[in-house]
Image (tube, helix red, strand yellow):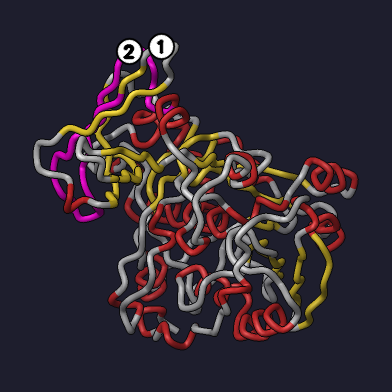
Amino acid sequence: MDPRDIRIESYAYELPEERIAAHPLPLRDDARLLVYRDGIIAEDTYRHAGRYIPAGALMVFNDTRVLSARIPFRKPSGGAIEVFLLGPAADRPGGMGELLSSTGAAECVCMVGGASKWKQGQVLERSFDPDRNLRLRASMTRRTDEGYLIRFEWTPADRCFSELLALAGEIPLPPYLNRTAEEADRTRYQTVYAREEGSVAAPTAGLHFTEEVFADLDRRGIGRAFVTLHVGAGTFRPVKADRMSDHIMHEEYMDVSRDLIGQLRAHKGPVYAVGTTSIRTLESLYWIGRRLIMDGPDGYASAPEVGQWDPYDAVLTGTEPGRDMALDALMAWMDARARDRVMTKTGLLIAPGYRFRMVDGLFTNFHQPASTLLLLVAAIAGPGWRAMYEHALTNGYRFLSYGDGSLIHRVDPPGR
């Protein structure tokens, strides 16, 4: 199957509004866990997730941290304007890390609520943090394909942009929760291992893991590793095209250490991704390494980006380096340039027809109908995804970001 031929209506189901979890459970690891293996469904909670992972496995988590990306302003007339940070401008070479460390001023791509009320040239201002008289100004530079280019300036100028967001911004809850963020969301819409700032949405499969669960994984001989993929607002972008060939996949920033790549290369046991962002990152590593093999490493001063259709065009060429070859090529490229990290963007679409190279299983929440995230679930679960979702709906599972989750075991091992 070529995913370009997929009709998104084939991956729709009816999700009653009352099944969407508006708030998290009091205890993270009380969330229910549906385990799917070879067409058989079992049930448990995340507290016992380690029972369903073999000893010697490696679990890979996304350690991104959600930014307080919603910044409210008031016009002098009193009208509300909300600026939602998406990321750095396309021509900004340093990516999200450089943007967040900016002092005094920063230019970002944003969505703007009430944009029609924001006149060209008008500067919006707000003051906060009275002890230091911190003042923030925002002006609209121009429209872009993704939204608007907004220039922020602030005084005193010694504060970095990430500090400014923490003071001025609000946690960007998904729109389908239909509520404003509360103080508790600052903690609960972050994983307990969140570290690298840069996301505007949480890697929600990881919200259910706790230090107690990690201790149980350690006792069972199950390893842990971390990658970083900064989740963009595009993760909520609906598929409006009838056929996937007409849908443009969102791109996200990924950051992976050389140590993690070496760990993957040496690891001979199964690999389980925690979340769709982790699985996109791991599979993207394969396609970066393959590109270095096919094109030669000398032409890439920075790590290649991964395009939406790269895996499917590559299959058509009939050329298929193995997983270990791809990782070796990636490590050799890093060594030749004295790099300790791979930082690039991925627009990888994982959908039915995709063959996994890096992972054996996936922890993930229950996703929206007719979404690219549901296509990813269908790619790893096969046609059984529908039985999973029907079981979850029939048996009272909670859906979407603050809802319950699943563990999906692949039937066939990935290509090594």
- Asked whether residue 155 is drawn in magenta, I would say yes
Q: Pointer 2 and pointer 1: residues touching (CB < 8 Å)?
A: yes
Image position of 376 (left or right of 165): right
Q: In the displayed structure, does residue 120 sit left or right of residue 373?
A: left
Q: Residue at x 49, y 35 (%)?
A: 197
Is 202 on the left or on the right of 9, as rendered?
right
Q: Amino acid at mark 2?
A: Pro
Disc 2: which residue: 156
The magenta span reads 136-162
Around disc 1, counting alpha carbons within 10 Å, would you say few (fewer than 14), some (14 to 19), or many (20 or more)?
few
In-image side of 182 versus 4 (left or right): right
**Residue at 68 percent of width and 58 percent of height:** 272
> Quarter of the image holding residue 153?
top left
Q: Secondary structure at mark 1?
A: loop
Q: Nearer the viewer, residue 50 or 369?
A: 369
Q: Secondary structure at mark 2?
A: loop
Q: Give whichever of 10, 111 is nearer the camera.
A: 111
| Residue 225 x %, y % | 67, 43
Residue 323 against residue 185 in the figure, above or below: below
